[in-house]
Image: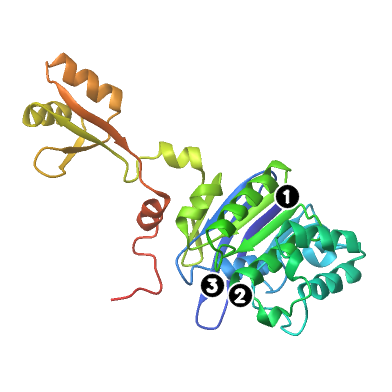
Amino acid sequence: MIELKSLTKEYKDKVAVDDLSFNIKPGVVTGFLGPNGAGKSTTMRMILNLVKPSKGEVIIDGEHYINLNQPIFKIGALIDADALNPKLTSFQHLQLIATASGISKDRVIEMLKKTGLEKVKNKKIGEYSLGMRQRLGIAAALLGDPETIILDEPFNGLDVDGINWLRSLIKDLAKQGKAVLVSSHLMSEVEAVAERIIVLAQGRLIADMSVEEISEKSFSGYLRIKSENNSKLEDILKKNKAYISKEGEDTLQVRKIEAEKAGILAKENNIAIFELTKVQPSLEQLFLELTEGKVDYKSN
C-alpha cells in the first residue's frame, strides 16, 4: 500500500500541494480529480520521487521510493505520453527498460500484444499517434507487473475502441489485487471505472469517498415529483422539512426527504403521484459542486 503523509510542495510563489494525506489501496480503482492547477500532477510526481516534497513523505510498503530495490516491480506509471524517444521503435523502448530491470523479452512481447501494439512494434515512435503513444506508455507502466499503477490522463487520444479497452484493462488490474490511481479530466471515464474518488482543489484534499458514499450523499441529488396537486403536496413536504424548488410548471424538485417517505405522505393525503424519480447527480456535477470557488484558472 502507498501512504501519503502530510505531503506538501511549496514553490516561491505558491503552495502546489498542501498537507495532503491519503492511501492508495490494493484492489481498488481510485479516481484522482481536481481542477487545473489543483496539484494532481505534482502529487503523482512526488509519489514517483520525480519531485521532492517540501514536507511530508510517501511510504511504499514501509519504504521510501528511493530505498526500493527495484521500483518497477512496485509502481508502474504513465505520467507523460510524449516523454519518449521518437527515433526508437516501441519494441526498442520497452526492451531498453526490460534489459535495465532484468525483465525478459517475452514480457516485452506480451505487453505489446496486451496494448495492441504488436503489429507496429518496429515502427518509429515519432510516427505514432497520441493514442498509440498512450498505449506504449501503459505498456511500459505494466512491464514489471507492478503492485500499483498510476495513470495520468490515460484516455487522451484514444478512440472509442481504445477507451473501451482501457476501461476493461483498468478494472481487470484491480481485480488482480493491484492498486490503480487514475487521473483524468474526462469525468465520464473516471465514473465508469472508479470505486473511490479523491478530489483536490488548490492543493488540498476536499473529498475522499467511495462511489457508494457519493451516492448516499445528498449533494445536488433530488427527487423529481409530479402529482395531481403539487401545491398541496409542496405544503405537506415542507412541513416534513423537505426543501422544494420548481422544475417547470408541473414538476417539483424535492431535497432532504427520502423517496419512500414522500410517496407515503402523498398516499396518506390522497394525492395521486404521476412521477416520483430519484435524480442522482453525475460525477461531473458533484465535482463542480465540490470545487466551486476553489478553481485557480477560470475562464470569463
Q: Is residue 175 left or right of residue 67?
A: left
The mark found on residue 247 in the picture is none
Q: Gap between marks 3 and 1, in whole Å?
A: 24 Å
Residue density around tag 3, few if under 14, some if 14–19, many if 20 or more, within 10 Å: many
Where is residue 136? Give x, y as percent.
70, 68
Q: Going 51% across and 48% down the picture, which residue do you hit?
A: 192
Q: Secondary structure at mark 3?
A: strand
The answer to whether residue 102 of the structure is visible from this angle is yes
Q: Residue 9, percent across and down?
A: 60, 72
Tell me whether circle 2 and circle 3 mark residues in contact (CB < 8 Å): no
Taking 27 as reference, is 101 left or right? Answer: right
Q: Position of residue 146 (x, y in %)?
A: 78, 55
Q: Toward the viewer: 2 or 163?
A: 163
Give the Cα separation between the discs numbered 2 and 1: 34 Å
Q: The C terminus is located in which quarter?
A: bottom left
Q: How many marks?
A: 3
Q: Quadrant of residue 132?
A: bottom right
Write the residue at 70% across / 48% down: 173
Q: Viewer-proximal residue, 68 or 222?
A: 222
Quick one: label 1, few (<14), some, or many (20+) residues within 10 Å? some
Q: The residue under label 3 is which amino acid type? A: Ala
Q: Quadrant of residue 49?
A: bottom right
Query: Visible in this render: residue 103?
Result: no
Q: CA distance from mark 2 to mark 3?
A: 31 Å
- Please tell me whether mark 2 or mark 3 is closer to you in this view: 2
User: What is the x, y in percent for residue 198?
Assistant: 53, 53
Name the residue that disc number 2 marks.
Answer: 129
SS for callout 1:
loop
SS type, badge 2: loop
Residue that numbered label 1 is attached to: 1
Q: Pointer 3: what residue?
A: 16
